[in-house]
Amino acid sequence: MGHDHQHPHDLASPGAELFHTHSHGGVVHTHVAGDQPHFHGALHVRGVVLPGTEPRDLWISEGVIRTEPVADAVTIAEDCFIVAGLVDAHCHIGLGHGGEVSPEEAEQQALADRDAGTLLIRDAGSPADTHWIDEREDLPRVIRAGRHIARPRRYIRNFADEVDPEELVATVEKQVANGDGWVKLVGDWIDRDTGDLAPLWPPAVAQQAIERAHELGARVTAHCFEEQSVAELVEAGIDGIEHGTGMSDEVIEQMAERQVALVPTMINLENFPDIAAAGESKFPAYAAHMRQLYATRLDVLGKAREAGVPIFAGTDAGGVMAHGLVADEVEQLTRIGDTEFALGAASWRAREWLGVPGIEEGASADLVIFETNPLDDMTAVKHPKFILLRGKLVPAR
């Protein structure tokens, strides 16, 4: 069919490069040159929607994805590779190394994640109330777990809601109300009396708390470094494990059978040697334990993947880790699986797990577009061509 070329319309911002409009069988598209066009109206992209292999056309109108042509759509990319907006499934918005941060700093954290292509965050515990983010169309979506729950003097100061075991069930109820369908327990931390990692909660109490969360419609996850805590919490019916370096073969089998999710936060595990060194003089057994968990981490996590444990990408941003590192986490995940596994852990599979639509008719147009196929070159994840959040192009900063 012929192409009917028209004169350019003033859709781009001042200083943008030239563009042209033409029709394909009566459907009008405008092609825009330049890296970051700014305009209003419908958009069009044509590319391979990963993990598929064949090119597809997508239109974005009124903030949602359309699979049928939309007239007067502006074509922003062709011959590209498209993924559903990236997911950081272990992230802490509103948390810094000293505890709660200001809303201004929390905003910068969220923007750093967004600019890396993270458009959906499962916030794995924060002392800050960040529900104001929900009113901001320029910030990622956040699914919260309320505030971490730990025992007094058994976790990082100013991070957690610190309670004794007899208060755990009531505190879970409170944090369910503060969250968006998740609760986060601190499963283990250093016990100063024994000088090593140890569980925080008696198994029977943990089971009661998990059951109560389930009654209230929430899922429960837990920070677990060492062996005993993860075994007890999986046995108690928990829904997710964070880090998971202490999983035994038996625990991995249980998790695979029940589809208990694992978010290993692999870039944060790289801090284990430094953590061990910092605690060496005062707690040598703890330091040795952390080094042993680090040394076996890839073998343990690889076994979990091979067994069918659902694994998702999380950076542990906030506190120690910087925000905006989802591409680094995806790259680390290729150490235990192939590129499709790694990218899916931060995109389509993670969205399905969290119950948030990906690339489908009527879904929010949260997309990351690459010039190079990340499944062939994982470093491409660090260099998106375009990021669209709620159908709007994320501006370069």
Image (cartoon, helix red, strand yellow):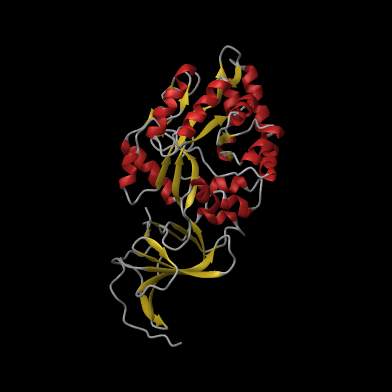
Query: Which residue is at a point 51% across and 41% down the rendered structure image?
Result: 315
Q: Position of residue 219 (x, y in %)?
A: 49, 36
Q: Position of residue 149 (x, y in %)?
A: 46, 26
Foreground: 178 or 291? 178
Query: Which residue is at a point 56% across and 39% down the rendered structure image?
Result: 265
Can residue 70 be seen at all in this image of the molecule? yes
Foreground: 328 or 277? 328
User: In the picture, residue 178 is in which quadrant?
Assistant: top left
Query: Which residue is at a point 46% across and 87% down the rendered structure image?
Result: 1
User: In the picture, residue 26 is in which quadrant?
Assistant: bottom left
Q: Is residue 91 left or right of residue 236?
A: left
In the displayed structure, 47 sits above or below 215; it is below
Foreground: 295 or 52? 52
In the displayed structure, 112 sits above or below 238; it is below
Q: Is residue 369 left or right of residue 262?
A: left
Q: Residue furthest bottom?
A: 2
- Total labels: the figure holds 0
Q: Position of residue 363 (x, y in %)?
A: 42, 58
Can residue 164 be seen at all in this image of the molecule? no
Q: Position of residue 365 (x, y in %)?
A: 41, 59
Q: Residue furthest top?
A: 193
